[in-house]
């Protein structure tokens, strides 16, 4: 894992969170007196990741000032969007700061407990082009549902707002071959979740059902829930 580089997608404006967090980028929202981003960096540290690129945009200066060029032994570099590029566009821009094959990608506004080395080994064993970490929740309607076949290949994405029932969701952690990212158009706004992954169905896209406890900070309600989520992991 020490040879794998990670990219954290940290460019979002956090529009839905503005009523409770208005003075900083979403990834710097405080959770138990610590920026949420630090929880993701801690997770990468435990997995022995040595190099991280932060894909930034909105209020990028705050992130760079707070984190700097290293975090607890992890080398940190930055890829700043001049204009909003979405998760896929930001990732395409950030790829130029990395050399590893594959790359590990994390959404900056969610956290999922997982053995990242096991996740990586699964990606390799399946000879996958792209692997999405999946975790099970009681109500998929807020997140959308991901369905896989018995081999683990992703066969369907259901949009948010469907039937409220238990199921597997995208946990915001991805292992991607470089060519998948290199094929993305440069400088264009594009979404991994809504556009890129659905296009990869049937072309080496797998889901790893190895995610554990999950939390995101996309809404005031989920941000409130995050305040107690990390207490057992202190």
Image: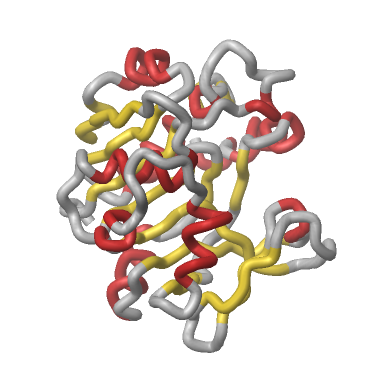
Residue 191 location (% of width, % of height): 51, 49
Q: In this view, which residue lies farthest toward the bottom?
A: 150
Residue 179 in the image: above or below residue 37: below
Residue 115 location (% of width, % of height): 40, 60
Can residue 42 be seen in the rendering of this structure?
Answer: no
State the residue at coordinates (47%, 80%): 202
Can residue 123 be seen in the rendering of this structure?
Answer: yes
Please name the colour scheme applied to the rendered image: secondary structure
State the residue at coordinates (58%, 62%): 135
| For residue 115, side relative to residue 209 (left or right) | left
Q: Count of labels shown?
A: 0
State the residue at coordinates (50%, 29%): 27
The one nearer the camera, 115 or 136, is: 136
Residue 230 location (% of width, % of height): 57, 38
Q: In which quarter of the image is residue 70?
A: top left
| For residue 126, side relative to residue 57 (left or right) | left
Q: In which quarter of the image is the N terminus?
A: bottom left
| For residue 222, side relative to residue 148 (left or right) | right
State the residue at coordinates (56%, 85%): 149
The one nearer the camera, 233 or 64, is: 64
Residue 160 location (% of width, % of height): 73, 55
Q: In which quarter of the image is residue 144?
A: bottom right
Q: In this view, which residue lies farthest toward the right?
A: 163
Q: Quadrant of residue 213?
A: bottom right
The one nearer the camera, 185 or 79, is: 185
């Amino acid at each position: 894992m020490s040879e794998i580089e990670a990219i954290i997608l940290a460019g979002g404006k956090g529009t839905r969170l503005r009523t409770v967090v208005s003075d900083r980028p979403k990834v710097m929202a405080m959770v138990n007196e610590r920026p949420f981003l630090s929880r993701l960096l801690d997770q990468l540290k435990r997995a022995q990741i040595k190099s991280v690129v932060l894909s930034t945009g909105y209020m990028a200066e705050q992130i760079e000032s707070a984190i700097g060029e290293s975090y607890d032994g992890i080398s940190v570099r930055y890829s700043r969007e001049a204009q909003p590029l979405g998760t896929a566009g930001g990732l395409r821009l950030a790829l130029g700061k990395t050399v590893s094959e594959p790359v590990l990608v994390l959404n900056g506004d969610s956290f999922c407990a997982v053995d990242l080395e096991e996740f990586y080994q699964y990606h390799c064993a399946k000879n996958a082009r792209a692997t999405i970490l999946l975790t099970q929740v009681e109500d998929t309607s807020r997140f959308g549902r991901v369905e896989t076949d018995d081999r683990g290949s992703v066969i369907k994405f259901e949009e948010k707002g469907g039937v409220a029932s238990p199921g597997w969701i995208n946990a915001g952690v991805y292992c991607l071959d470089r060519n998948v990212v290199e094929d993305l158009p440069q400088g264009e706004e594009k979404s991994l979740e809504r556009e890129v992954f659905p296009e990869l169905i049937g072309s080496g896209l797998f889901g790893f059902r190895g995610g554990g406890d999950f939390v995101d900070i996309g809404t005031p309600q989920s941000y409130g829930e995050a305040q107690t989520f990390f207490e057992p992991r202190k």
